[in-house]
Image (tube, rainbow, N blue to C red):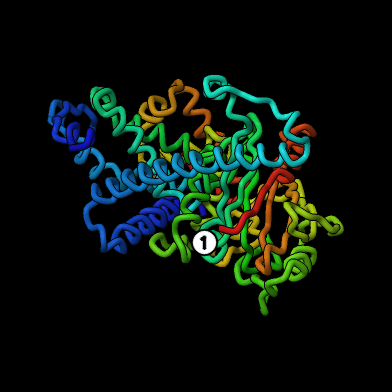
Amino acid sequence: MTWLNLERGDPVVQGGESAAVGSLETFEEFYAREFSAVVALAFALSGSRTASEDLAQEAFLAAHRNWARVAEYERPDLWVRRVVSNMSMSMFRRRYAEARALARFAPRPAATMPELSADDAEFWAAVRSLPRRQAQVIALRYLDDRSVAEIAEILGTATGTVKKQLHDGRQNVIRRLRLEEDDS
Amino acid sequence: MTFDTRAHRAVQGIHRAVEVMEMSDTKTPQRITRFDQYRERKSRNQRIAAIAVGIAVPVALLLGAVRLLGSNGETNVPVTTPSESLTAPLGPQIHLFTAFGDPSFDGSYVIKMELFDGYEGDPGDVVFGSDGGQGISTWTVGNVYADPCHSSGTLLDPPIDSSVHGLVAGLTSQERSHATKPTDVEVDGYAGKYMEMTVPAGTNMADCDHGQYRIWVSPQGGNRYREAGQRDMLWILNVDGTRLVIDAALGPKTTLQDRRDRIQMVESIQIDPV
């Protein structure tokens, strides 16, 4: 029996918003619930169809290694988002994951992740061209539908800072893509 | 169109892509199975890497000792007792490259390079420096984009031929990039051409197709892309009829010493038939 199997059966208390407070949750349940959202975040922030799944898996691997501790956090779902958003924005990590993916998959690994439309790809490329924190804030707010308070917790910063980064990020994208100003 | 409208559409695009990815993965319908496979693969790769390094380092040390014997004569070789050799430093770290999963090359040759302090990379992968992700990689190149920024549909047709000259011609004719005049070079006895290419510093990746400045594509379909202002030192070698590219990248934070180190590391490369 591996150490993974030993840990797997251990139920933990999960207090995140997306699960009932006080419910028992295993790593498998956590993974099954969060994987799609985490890989989406990795895709948006890395821009790499080949690396995004690996980035998400790496984030979950980090959670799994530390599951006894992570599961006790009030919001493990926010923790795994912090890990993946930092990894995805790190040039080192992104290239590293992509290099691994390219080396592993042949022929073309992008077969399972379809290409975005030109408009969508342009939008996310504009987001990724923003300063790191602005890009993370935009992705977490719009793609992951997180509140300002949640984003502040994920990024370990103040809500006021998140609001400013959200405003600046939006304005920068509006300028770069020549969009109309929003009322909001 | 407003930001919110555009963002909403782009979010839907990402969700659709992830959904298609998950639906297309029919062999592993259960997500946790995929995680287990990833974890096991990583664990296996780490074991293989450890074995590879365990083999490569003693072999490199042995080869080094043999060369030392040949050049200096037996009397100059320091003699160590077994107990001394156990505590002595192991010598330079050796990195093993692969040509990014090109089975025709990776099955035939082993590429070894001395790894300087401050550089890292798993065996078989890219070597990274500490200057923002720039590093050294090895490639077999399949074809070149005519326009790296607007790369969609611009792979050269007919594709470049398989010679060193074919790739040099493709790269020097590439739009936007600045290429130096190719000069003769030799790495570990394999001859070829050396050139440097620079991406214009003002390039806005957001204006490029896929948000990337794509230089070439490997035979397996992997794209090599670069950042604005990036300069790449390229050694394009003829390895027994197969073209191998050693790419050492320099970025805005790369120092002159980093550049010297990378040249020295590339010059330490050994390409040995399996």
Q: Residue at x 56, y 24 (%)?
A: B85
Q: Which residue is drawn at 21% across and 37% down?
A: A2
- Which sits in the foreground, B199 or A40? B199
Viewed as shown, does residue A42 lie left or right of B37? right
Viewed as shown, does residue B44 lie left or right of B178? left
Q: Is residue B147 shown above or below A10?
A: below
> Which residue does the numbered mark 1 point to in the structure image?
B107
Residue B59, how many percent across, how many down?
Answer: 57, 42
Q: Can residue A172 be seen in this view?
A: no
- Which sits in the foreground, B138 or A21? B138
- What quarter of the picture does the C terminus of chain B occupy? bottom right
Quadrant in which residue B212 is drawn: bottom right
Q: Is residue A155 visible?
A: yes
Q: What is the total number of numbered labels drawn onto the structure image?
A: 1
Residue B218, how many percent across, how many down?
Answer: 58, 63
Label 1 Cα neighbours within 10 Å, binned few <14 / some 14-19 / many ≥20: few
Q: Residue at x 75, y 55 (%)?
A: B189
In the image, farthest residue toward the front:
B75
Q: Residue at x 74, y 45 (%)?
A: B267
Viewed as shown, does residue A19 lie left or right of A124? left
- Which sits in the foreground, B151 or A105? A105
Residue type at numbered disc 1: Gly
The chain holding disc 1 is B
Q: Is residue A159 shown above or below A57?
A: above
Residue B131, how many percent across, how many down?
Answer: 66, 34
- Which sits in the foreground, B150 or B273? B273
In the image, farthest residue toward the bottom:
B158
Residue B76, how many percent across, how many down?
Answer: 75, 29
Give the structural element (helix, strand or loop) at label 1: loop
Q: Is residue A169 shown above or below A114?
A: above
